[in-house]
């Protein structure tokens, strides 16, 4: 029996929410190990739609323990709002089924404001990153800078004022430099005290809970946010998020040893999308991109921003397989390709006239690469709702098998619609 890490193998938005929900039925514990409420997961369960940003996808399943790990940056106000919305939909959100790591860093209003100040300044100079303006990056900066306020600090009102002072020394200097008014000590203290009673009941020693669960033989599902190509180290820097999104982050981000991870599942869309700025070699800013975006409903769950769309990029996914140690992929949204006469797949790049089989790390080189395509025959039948290989058109099966060859990883799950049961199981990651 293997504990499973789920990661996105592209730029996020690959359909992790549905797959994690599908796997959570087999899991005992579901853990978010990085990111913040900038990640959006849409779940469709029995025709009911749940939109999650911060809470683990297991929260909509009764009898599962959901955990927010220390690798997450946690906005307490976003948590309160999201919890209230889910409770209104009949979902139980309580300290019995949800735990928040005591050493999780908080996102405060000053982080959101700083995020916006910087993005506005960058927009004026043409260098914006395309953040969600939710304070994720500034919160991670404070964590690494050893000035973050953490969940456990809400329970210690003797030391909390000193921590707030340290935080404001840094932030008010930045705000003055950017031409914005300072934030008062009293305002931040009130912001923290106002949510403490709602957050503290969920606080716990997550590392100890996970160790106990592992020793008891529980199945643990680790849920990542965003995608590999948005990783702070391995993504299309600087157009990335502010955390490590790769599978290896599940260990420090949850407080569990790497030997506890048995299977890495890479969620992979049958084409490619991206939100925000940055390079996108296979982008189709044409009728193909419009077709994919319209049929695939490609709008961000959190921001509502329209996603950029393009052909499947085997170079990028093959690289993600290597960086994450992906054992198998969950291929999603195959049905969006139904009806196309031909489908292109990127198998390599040309960089300054030289053929390469990887995405270079340099920002300049990433902007110059040109995709090399292979053209495959499309299919006229439908894959939507298929639950076995026999339900798929022959050309769709050929497309899936060819992707496996190109990326060097097998398809473990094949998703054919947003409904959780419209899934073809090849390999159960928990039994691998």
Image (spheres, grey):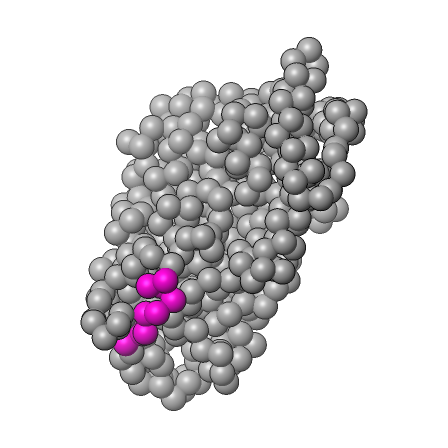
Q: Nearer the viewer, residue 73 or 211?
A: 73
Q: Nearer the viewer, residue 181 or 12?
A: 181
Q: Is residue 394 visible?
A: no
The residue at the point 31 percent across, 74 percent down is 371
Position of residue 144 measured from the top left corner of the image (x, y, whole percent): 48, 31
Q: Nearer the viewer, residue 36 or 405?
A: 36
Task: Check residue 371 for magenta coloring.
Answer: yes
Position of residue 196 measured from the top left corner of the image (x, y, whole percent): 71, 25
Quadrant housing the N terminus? top left
Q: Is residue 9 left or right of residue 147?
A: left
Q: Is residue 106 visible?
A: yes
Position of residue 428 measured from the top left corner of the image (x, y, whole percent): 33, 50
Quadrant of the rendered image containing residue 177: top right
Quadrant of the rendered image containing residue 395: bottom left
Image height of 303 relative to 103, above or below? below
The residue at the point 62 percent across, 43 percent down is 135
The residue at the point 42 percent across, 67 percent down is 280
Quadrant housing the C terminus? top left
Task: Check residue 216 for magenta coloring.
Answer: no
Image height of 209 relative to 172, above or below? above
Q: Is residue 368 left or right of residue 166?
A: left
Q: How many marks?
A: 0
Q: Is residue 392 left or right of residue 141?
A: left
Position of residue 117 measured from the top left corner of the image (x, y, whole percent): 66, 48
The residue at the point 41 percent across, 48 percent down is 231
Q: Which residues are magenta?
A: 364-372
Quadrant of the rendered image containing residue 414: bottom left
Image height of 41 relative to 223, above or below? below
Q: Nearer the viewer, residue 159 or 32?
A: 159
């Amino acid at each position: 029996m293997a504990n499973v890490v789920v990661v996105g193998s592209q730029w996020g938005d690959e359909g992790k929410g549905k797959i994690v929900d599908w796997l959570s039925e087999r899991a005992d514990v579901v853990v978010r190990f990085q990111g913040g409420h900038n990640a959006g997961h849409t779940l469709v369960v029995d025709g009911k739609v749940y939109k999650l940003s911060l809470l683990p996808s297991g929260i909509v399943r009764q009898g599962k323990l959901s955990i927010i790990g220390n690798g997450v940056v946690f906005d307490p106000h976003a948590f309160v709002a999201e919890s209230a919305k889910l409770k209104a939909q009949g979902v139980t959100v309580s300290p019995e089924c949800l735990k928040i790591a005591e050493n999780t860093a908080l996102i405060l209003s000053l982080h959101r404001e700083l995020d916006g100040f910087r993005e506005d300044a960058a927009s004026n100079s043409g260098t914006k990153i395309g953040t969600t303006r939710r304070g994720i990056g500034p919160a991670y900066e404070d964590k690494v800078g050893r000035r973050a306020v953490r969940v456990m600090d809400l329970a210690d009102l003797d030391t909390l004022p000193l921590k707030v002072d340290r935080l404001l020394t840094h932030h008010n200097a930045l705000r003055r430099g950017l031409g914005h008014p300072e934030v008062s000590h009293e305002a931040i203290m009130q912001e923290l005290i106002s949510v403490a009673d709602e957050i503290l009941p969920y606080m716990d020693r997550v590392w100890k809970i996970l160790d106990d669960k592992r020793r008891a033989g529980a199945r643990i599902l680790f849920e990542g946010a965003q995608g590999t190509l948005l990783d702070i180290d391995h993504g299309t820097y600087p157009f990335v998020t502010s955390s490590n999104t790769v599978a290896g982050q599940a260990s420090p981000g949850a407080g569990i040893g790497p030997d506890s991870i048995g299977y890495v599942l890479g969620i992979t869309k049958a084409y490619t999308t991206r939100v925000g700025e940055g390079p996108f070699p296979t982008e189709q800013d044409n009728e193909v991109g419009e077709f994919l975006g319209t049929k695939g409903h490609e709008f961000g769950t959190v921001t509502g921003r329209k996603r950029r769309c393009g052909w499947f990029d085997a170079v990028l996914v093959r690289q993600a397989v290597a960086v994450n140690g992906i054992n198998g992929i969950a291929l999603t949204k195959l049905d969006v390709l139904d009806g196309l006469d031909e489908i292109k797949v990127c198998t390599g790049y040309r960089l300054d006239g030289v053929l390469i089989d990887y995405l270079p790390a340099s920002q300049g080189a990433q902007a110059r690469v040109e995709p090399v395509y292979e053209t495959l025959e499309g299919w006229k039948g439908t894959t939507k709702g298929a639950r076995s290989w026999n339900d798929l058109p022959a050309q769709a099966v050929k497309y899936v098998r060819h992707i496996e060859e190109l990326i060097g990883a097998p398809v473990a799950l094949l998703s054919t619609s947003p409904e959780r049961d419209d899934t073809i199981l090849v390999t159960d990651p928990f039994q691998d």
